[in-house]
Amino acid sequence: MNGNTQQAHSSSAVQGPRIYVACLAAYNNGCLHGQWICADQDAEAIRSEIFAMLKTSPIDEAEEWAIHDYEGFEGAEIAEYASIETVAELAVFLNERGALGSKLLKHFCGNLEEAENAFDNYAGSYRSLADYARDLIEETTETPERLANYIDYDAIARDMELGGEVFTIELGFEETHVFWSR
């Protein structure tokens, strides 16, 4: 990687999600012509940048394009012919939700609407699901002190997850995000 490429990559981390859009007429004629475009703007602004790139193509009257690369999408995948609306919505979601949003997208097989709706049932971040079960029981149930040490929070947490009541997303060591499956 040369210095210019490295600089472009390091500055992209600050810029957020972006896509590399290539002119297909140029590509099919053995010439690379395209542009990196910030994806965290509205779809019309992205489209305007694509059309401006196509106007400067070395092939006259170029009008077809494809997404040939992307970065800053926290591991979420962008298809070569994804709609610009989808790219813009995904970029906004990932800017707001980061790695947790990305893992939710994977959990919901790329369904952005389901990933967004999951936050309506977000219970919070805990060291483990057992810690969440402990907090939940302590907040909702009056347990006699002499019985408190006999409660198996790990078993309760396992039952909650296996029973489909909750699901978890782990982002790191002792960083478990809990969501109700409502």
Image (cartoon, rainbow, N blue to C red):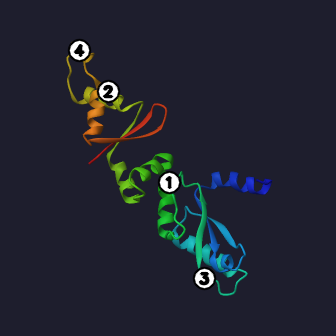
- Taking 68 as reference, is 64 above or below it? below
Q: Earlier in the sequence, mark 1 or mark 2?
A: 1
According to the picture, the residue beneath numbered tag 3 turns out to be: 63
The amino acid type found where label 3 is placed reads Glu
* Residue 123 screen position, x and y as percent: 34, 40
The amino acid type found where label 1 is placed reads Leu
- Taking 48 as reference, is 125 above or below it? above
According to the picture, the residue beneath numbered tag 2 turns out to be: 154
Badge 1 element = helix
The amino acid type found where label 2 is placed reads Asp
Instruction: Residue at 25% x, 28% y: name it.
Output: 137
* Residue 75 screen position, x and y as percent: 53, 52
**Rendering quarter of residue 20:** bottom right
Left or right of 116 in this view: 11: right
Estimate the spatial distance between the alpha carbons at disc 2 and disc 3, rounded to whole Å. 58 Å
Mark 2: few/some/many CA within 10 Å (<14, 14-19, 20+): some
Instruction: Residue at 50% x, 68% y: name it.
Output: 82
According to the picture, the residue beneath numbered tag 1 turns out to be: 94
According to the picture, the residue beneath numbered tag 4 turns out to be: 145
Estimate the spatial distance between the alpha carbons at disc 4 and disc 3, rounded to whole Å. 72 Å
Mark 3: few/some/many CA within 10 Å (<14, 14-19, 20+): some
Badge 3 element = loop
Instruction: Residue at 78% x, 57% y: name it.
Output: 4
